[in-house]
Image: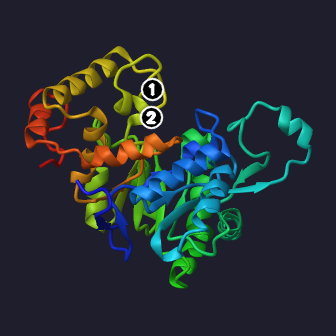
């Protein structure tokens, strides 16, 4: 599979490469990454042909945007695609010393506190702040970020922020798109139930789906992807390795959707590994290529924080996978029968 062949994203004019880069690791997600390591990783990907990059103000409280922007602003703007996210506004903490001493998300990120803000003014503020951090005067798409129960903590807050988005923030996004300042409006989702709820209220172009559609599980095939197909909504897949286990296999410390795998989850992945081994296919290659067989999916965007991570992902995309592998996975009950495959 050609990692850099381009696909149209839903109904938008954007044609994205099949393989992109997810910037969460550059916020020191699980591992502290130096500026030099981030630079070397981006350079290695660029030298191999990587041209699609996704980031967010949330990743390291601005750190990922700074690092990716510092690299990309030295490249010709017409040669790459860049997406970032809205939904949080960052400010200097009232008490910097107390903030530095506090236990918080992204402990090795930048020292800015945030508030969730999906209003008209909040979305425009987040957009302009991102441009400043990136050092670029436009991005190709904006995504609504983390508007869900897991991140907001209560159903009341989810409903309130959805209403704020529907009555204000969405208008800001539509104005940016109408003015040609972005090419698409999307939303990042991690859990089932978010896509239908968003589509009831919002006219979106695409979703960045992390976790509910991987080689390990495909629950979005029941209702959510068919709903997207009816509306011409495109899909980008993040979390393609299910937070790591589909890259490494079942090894000590491997995580499945950001938790230690249950015995059943570990057995399931071991079964997939065994089928891949019988066909001489690396597990990571199957995990990367699988989502792209779905007609809605335009791209997959694994992360990485070392040069060999991105070069290995590119090689995995290019690894030839026989049709018999997919057939065996389905026959063994390790992959849904209705999952699109060759």
Q: Residues within 10 Å of mark 2 (few under 14, many from 20)?
A: some
Q: Is residue 87 left or right of residue 77?
A: right
Q: Quadrant of residue 20?
A: bottom left
Query: Secondary structure under badge 1?
Result: loop
**In the foreground, 158 or 151:** 151
Query: Secondary structure under badge 2?
Result: helix
Q: Quadrant of residue 326?
A: top left
Q: Check whether the beta carbons of the residues at disc 1 and disc 2 lie within 8 A of each other.
A: yes
**In the foreground, 85 or 31:** 31
Q: Which mark is residue 243?
A: 2
Q: Residues within 10 Å of mark 1 (few under 14, many from 20)?
A: many
Alpha carbons under labels 1 and 2: distance apart: 6 Å
**Residue at the image position 50 percent from the left and 71 percent from the top:** 140
* Residue 222 appears in the rendering: no
Q: Which mark is residue 255?
A: 1
**Residue at the image position 64 percent from the left and 49 percent from the top:** 58
Q: Position of residue 252 (x, y in %)?
A: 44, 16
* Residue 42 appears in the rendering: yes
> Which label's residue is closer to the chain start, 1 or 2?
2
**Residue at the image position 26 percent from the left and 53 percent from the top:** 292
């Amino acid at each position: 599979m050609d990692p850099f062949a381009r696909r149209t994203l839903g109904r938008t004019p954007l044609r994205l490469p099949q393989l992109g880069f997810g910037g969460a690791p550059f916020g020191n997600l699980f591992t502290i990454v130096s500026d030099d390591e981030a630079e070397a990783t981006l350079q290695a990907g660029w030298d191999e042909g990587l041209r699609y990059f996704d980031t967010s103000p949330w990743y390291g409280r601005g750190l990922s945007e700074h690092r990716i922007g510092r690299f990309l602003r030295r490249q010709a703007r017409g040669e790459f695609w860049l997406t970032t996210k809205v939904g949080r506004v960052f400010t200097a903490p009232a008490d910097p010393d107390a903030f530095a001493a506090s236990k918080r998300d992204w402990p090795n990120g930048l020292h800015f506190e945030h508030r969730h803000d999906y209003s008209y003014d909040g979305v425009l503020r987040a957009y302009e702040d991102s441009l400043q951090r990136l050092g670029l005067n436009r991005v190709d798409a904006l995504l609504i970020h983390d508007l869900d129960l897991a991140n907001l903590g209560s159903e009341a807050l989810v409903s309130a922020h959805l209403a704020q988005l529907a009555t204000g923030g969405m208008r800001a996004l539509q104005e940016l798109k109408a003015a040609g300042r972005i090419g698409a409006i999307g939303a990042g989702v991690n859990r089932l139930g978010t896509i239908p709820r968003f589509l009831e209220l919002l006219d979106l172009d695409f979703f960045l789906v992390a976790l509910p559609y991987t080689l390990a599980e495909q629950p979005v095939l029941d209702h959510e992807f068919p709903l997207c197909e009816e509306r011409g909504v495109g899909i980008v897949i993040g979390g393609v390795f299910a937070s790591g286990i589909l890259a490494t296999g079942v090894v000590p410390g491997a995580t499945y959707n950001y938790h230690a795998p249950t015995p059943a989850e570990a057995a399931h992945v071991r079964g997939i590994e065994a089928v891949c081994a019988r066909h001489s296919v690396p597990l990571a290659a199957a995990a990367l290529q699988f989502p792209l067989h779905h007609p809605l999916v335009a791209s997959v965007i694994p992360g990485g924080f070392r040069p060999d991570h991105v070069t290995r992902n590119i090689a995995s995309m290019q690894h030839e996978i026989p049709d018999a592998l997919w057939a065996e996975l389905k026959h063994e009950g390790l992959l849904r029968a209705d999952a699109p495959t060759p």
